[in-house]
Structures are given as C-alpha cells and as structure tokens.
Amino acid sequence: MRLTATVTSNTSAVVLVTGASSGLGLALSKKLLPTEYRLLLTARKNSLGRFAAAGITANERVRIRTLDVTSSAERDQVVREADETWGGVDVLINNAGVAYRTVVEHFNEADDWEQMDVNFRGPMELIRLVLPGMRRKRAGRILNVSSVGGMMAMPTMALYSASKFALEGATESLWYEVRPWNIHVSLVQPGFIHSDSFRNTRYTEASRRAADDPVNPYHRHYEQMAALIARLMAKASATPEQIADTILRTMRNPSPPLRVPATWDAHLFALLRRFLPRWIYHRFLYGQLPGVGGWGNGPEA
C-alpha cells in the first residue's frame, strides 16, 4: 500500500518526531496520540521526563526514545529500531531545533557548529538514514519544520537564519530528487507563535557580554531586538497547537506543497519577498527595526 493511502486513511504508518517533548513538538505529540499511527517520539535524555508530565506514556504503538539529533549513535539506534521492529520510518518530522541570538561579530566556529548541527546537519543525517527504506517502499513523507527565519533574516539572528536557510535549500533539492519514488517533502514555516519559547534563545559568550553591557557598540541591537521579538510573540495569535494541526494536514495531504507557511505573518513575508523589488524589501524591513536610528551611535569596542 502506498503511503499516500496509508497516511490519509489514518492507519498504522510509522511516524518519527524529533524534539517531541516541548513546545510545538509536544503539541504535535498530543495531536498524534489519538490517531492509529505508530509513534516514535524522541527528545534529548534530560527532556524525557516531560512526556510523563504531559500525560504521554509508552504503549504498544507509542515508543519514547532518547534522541539527540547531533549524536550519530543515537540517530542510528532509533532508525535501526524502526527498521527492525516496525518495518521502517514512513513519516519523518524534523522538529528539533535551537536558536542563538548573536550578531555575526559575536559567534565563533564552535557556536556555528552547534547551531548548524541541531538545525541542519542532524535533520539531514536522519533523512539520509530513512530514505533507503522509503525508496524501497516507493513511499514516504519528510516534513522539515523551518521558520520565517528561513525565508528572511533578522539582525542578531544570523546563525539561526543561516541554519534555516541551509535547511530550506537542501530540502528544496531533496524535493526534486525523491519525487520519482513517491516521497513527498515539505517545509513547514511558522512565523511568530504565542508562547514563551523566545526565553530559550541561547547567547554566545560574546553576545551575552554585549547584551549585558550598556556601553557595548552592539548593546542596542540585542536590547531592542530581544524586546521586539518578545512583544511579537506575546501578541501573536498562532499557537503551537495550530501549527501542529498544519503539520498533520500537510502530512495527510495526498499532494502536499514544498513550502507551507503556517502563520499569517509567514504568508505576509512570503508575499513581500515575491512581489517587492529586493532593494525596497530590505529598506522597508530595515526601517521597521526598533530604534534603528540610534544603532551604531555608541562607543567603539
């Protein structure tokens, strides 16, 4: 049976979700529980306790497994288990991600690798592991959770946007490559979500010093961008549950699109990029930055 029939008829396809213990991943896990899919819900070892706290426990069709997407051994183990006991992964949902707040001048090679490992290299490695089984079945679904940050960049979020731009580029190539095997590939692009997830944004050593130091030349960048993002998240109407519904609809769609804007602002930015000349687009967004007229007026470091 082709996966399009399996998924849309809500039978026992095997669904692997990364980053499933919190935020959007947890909302998606809860949406999947009442279905008939066989679930591999994964998270880092120190986050596994969140499943029980949310009322999610293992049973004959729900498995909770440790998966740090940057760990080759853990990636191999989870996919091997699915192959050997459940016949392979039918749907891969790459949801795990992290975000660094840093200007380009304030990150180093180690910061770069950590951001890219979680948001780009980890998902790509999981895709490589599940593709042979999907090709043999001539069916499969791969959904990569991207972001508005994958279609536009914001100051102080250079590393994050780089990782999401990379994910989008590789996913677009993959869309062409695997269509002959009836494997459907989609990018789900949320914008701002009504949650406090922005509090989990990481700082590099240098960006933390600058954010805490009022005389640092980049201090206003961090102060005003952090405040802007907090306001937008607080005012956003979209919820993790609504994004989870979008992921499920995309997963069950017999012919899903490559890119799926998941919030009204994601649709807006997509339209702006499509119809505005780039020089107008960038000048417009620059003019919307909070307090940008005062940026660069502080002392030189």
Image (tube, rainbow, N blue to C red):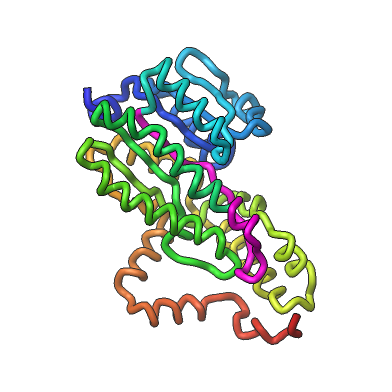
Q: Position of residue 26 (x, y in %)?
A: 54, 35
The residue drawn where x is 69% and y is 75% is 218
Residue 226, x across and y down, in percent: 65, 64
- Please state if 153 lies on the left or on the right of 245 as rendered: right
Q: Is residue 200 above or below residue 73?
A: below
Q: Is residue 94 magenta?
A: yes
For this orientation, the residue located farthest to the top is 60
Q: Is residue 71 above or below residue 164?
A: above
Kindly indicate the quadrant of the structure image that contains residue 297: bottom right
Which quarter of the rendered picture does the N terminus lie within?
top left
Above or below 222: residue 86 = above
For residue 57, which quarter of the picture? top right
Residue 283 shows up from this direction: yes
The stretch in magenta equals 90-114
Q: Position of residue 106 (x, y in %)?
A: 67, 67
Check if residue 281 falls in the magenta segment. Answer: no
Q: Position of residue 22 (x, y in %)?
A: 59, 38
